[in-house]
């Protein structure tokens, strides 16, 4: 009886400890993260946004950062951004001149950014034309969207820079979560400011299932995660879930957070971004 009482007391003490630790982490976070999103273009992107807004708060509780999210892009202003150390773009990008100016100044003054998948998309003509040279050509460096694989499938990724703080805990190659993979008009390898962190490994080919032949990649070099050394930023091509379009159920068929190694990278990327200013 005494043994069980001691075990109960120990368990209650442990629970109280973790409760207090969790409350302290929420009240005094190591850094603050805010995610911007639109969640209006493509059900696969909407699915990822909702999934991300469930996953990141859990990681915040575990690793000691706070996480907020907003679909109000007018919050991209100096006063609002001043209270956050890391900005996420879960999809799309700001379109209003004042929003763009505020974000550029935030990054040029040492802010941190993590962008996903459609956040880098630009195609002229489309709803998201390439009409922001600083963002697409200098900051992200990719230029415009050129093509993609279909349908969303997993890929084996090769870690190109294993010395970067975001990749030190990764194996040389790993299996990513299912995704629609993009390629771009600009040659990222030729840009001295770009540090390519991951690319599609050749063992992934053929990548994609079609049905159109150009939606299946058989060879080539495709960067999928990189950083611009002039800024505290990381872009990841992941962020497109598989959806049952054919069956017209719109059921989610995959999760962007189903890869343990990919999740480990995202956590380490956030912890690196939240450590302090680039300049």
Image (cartoon, helix red, strand yellow):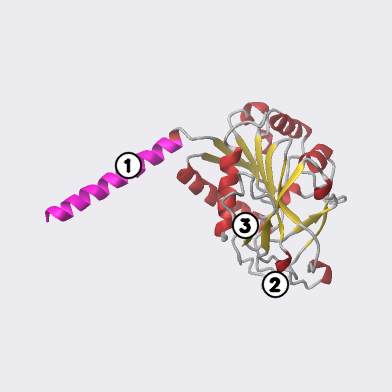
| Type of secondary structure dominating the magenta stretch | helix
Left or right of 102: which side holds 13? left
Among all residues in the image, which is located at the extreme front? 163
At x 66%, y 50%, the residue is 39
Quadrant of the rendered image containing residue 211? bottom right
Indicate the position of residue 45 as horizontal and vertical percent values.
67, 55
Q: The N terminus is located in which quarter?
A: bottom left
Left or right of 53: which side holds 115? right
Does 61 sit above or below residue 100?
below
At x 87%, y 50%, the residue is 124
Indicate the position of residue 78 as horizontal and vertical percent values.
67, 27
Residue 210, labelled with which disc? Answer: none
Which residue is labeled 3 in the image? 47
Indicate which disc, 2 or 3, sits on the residue closer to the N terminus: 3
In the structure shown, which secondary structural element does the residue marked by tag 2 occupy? loop
Q: Which residues are magenta?
A: 1-26
- Of tags 3 and 1, which is closer to the observer? 1
Indicate the position of residue 158 as horizontal and vertical percent values.
68, 58
Quadrant of the rendered image containing residue 206? bottom right
Which residue is labeled 1 in the image? 17
Q: CA distance from mark 2 to mark 1?
A: 50 Å
At x 56%, y 41%, the residue is 271
| Disc 1: CA contacts within 10 A as few (<14), some (14-19) or many (>=20) | few
In the structure shown, which secondary structural element does the residue marked by tag 1 occupy? helix
Indicate the position of residue 142 as horizontal and vertical percent values.
80, 48
Among all residues in the image, which is located at the extreme top? 79
- Of tags 2 and 1, which is closer to the observer? 1
Residues at badges 3 and 1 in contact (C-beta under 8 Å)?
no
Q: Is residue 2 magenta?
A: yes
Indicate which disc, 3 or 1, sits on the residue closer to the N terminus: 1
């Amino acid at each position: 009886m005494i043994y069980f009482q001691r075990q109960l007391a120990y368990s209650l003490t442990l629970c109280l400890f973790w409760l207090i630790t969790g409350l302290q982490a929420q009240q005094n976070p190591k850094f603050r993260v805010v995610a911007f999103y639109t969640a209006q273009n493509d059900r696969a992107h909407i699915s990822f946004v909702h999934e991300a807004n469930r996953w990141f708060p859990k990681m915040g509780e575990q690793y000691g950062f706070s996480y907020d999210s907003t679909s109000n892009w007018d919050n991209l202003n100096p006063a609002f951004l001043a209270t956050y150390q890391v900005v996420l773009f879960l999809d799309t990008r700001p379109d209003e001149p004042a929003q763009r100016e505020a974000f550029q100044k935030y990054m040029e003054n040492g802010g941190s950014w993590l962008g996903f998948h459609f956040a880098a998309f630009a195609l002229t003509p489309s709803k998201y034309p390439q009409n922001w040279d600083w963002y697409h050509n200098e900051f992200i460096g990719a230029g415009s969207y050129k093509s993609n694989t279909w349908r969303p499938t997993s890929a084996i990724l090769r870690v190109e820079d294993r010395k970067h703080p975001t990749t030190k805990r990764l194996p040389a190659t790993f299996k990513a979560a299912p995704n629609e993979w993009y390629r771009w008009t600009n040659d990222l390898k030729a840009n001295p400011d770009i540090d390519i962190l991951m690319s599609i490994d050749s063992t992934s080919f053929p990548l994609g299932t079609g049905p159109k032949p150009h939606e299946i990649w058989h060879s080539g070099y495709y960067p999928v995660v990189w950083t611009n050394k002039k800024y505290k930023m990381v872009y990841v091509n992941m962020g497109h879930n598989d959806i049952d379009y054919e069956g017209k159920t719109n059921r989610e068929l995959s999760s962007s957070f189903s890869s343990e190694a990919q999740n480990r990278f995202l956590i380490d990327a956030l912890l690196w971004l939240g450590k302090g200013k680039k300049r």
